[in-house]
Image: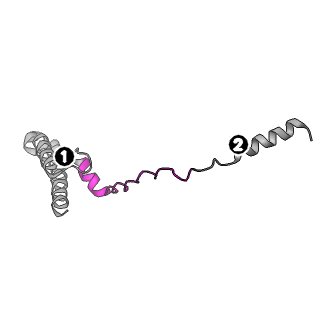
Amino acid sequence: MDLLGRIFRVVRAYAAAPEPRDAYEPWPPPVSPPAPAEDPVLAGYYANLELPYGANLAAVKAAWKRLMKQYHPDRHARDPAKREVANALCAQLTHAYKELEKSLTTH
């Protein structure tokens, strides 16, 4: 066997061997629990109100009021098509607000 082949095998075996572990290694840091999974239905309600998931009840109410002022059907009284869209949008906003209110007050 040639000398280079033998040196190559020794180096390869040394590199593949695991390092010895110290018996006094510090404990690994504690793993935090996983974040609660988002409820897709509630996430949709938060998105309708243009809020991040998990916003509190005060933020939900403020966003609902702001969006209702912006899209209220009375603001579009002259154009029947816009008024119809505003009615549907306000119904969706109110539904999202009621569902989030129910969810946030029960938990």
Foreground label between 1 and 2: 2
Amino acid type at image mark 1: Val
Q: Quadrant of residue 102?
A: bottom left
Q: Tell me what residue is drawn at x 73 percent, y 44 percent.
A: 14
At which x and y percent is residue 7? Answer: 82, 38
Read off the residue under disc 1: 85
Q: Tell me what residue is drawn at x 42 percent, y 51 percent.
A: 29
The local secondary structure at tag 2 comes to helix
What kind of secondary structure does the magenta stretch mostly adopt?
A: loop
The local secondary structure at tag 1 comes to helix
Q: Residues within 10 Å of mark 2 (few under 14, many from 20)?
A: few
Read off the residue under disc 2: 15
Q: Quadrant of residue 63?
A: top left
Amino acid type at image mark 2: Ala
At which x and y percent is residue 37? Answer: 34, 56
Q: Tell me what residue is drawn at x 12 percent, y 45 percent.
A: 62
Q: Is residue 86 one of those drawn in magenta?
A: no
Work out whether residue 100 or residue 13 is closer to the camera in this orientation and state it: 13
Q: Tell me what residue is drawn at x 65 percent, y 49 percent.
A: 18
Residue at the limit of the structure toward the front, as seen here: 24
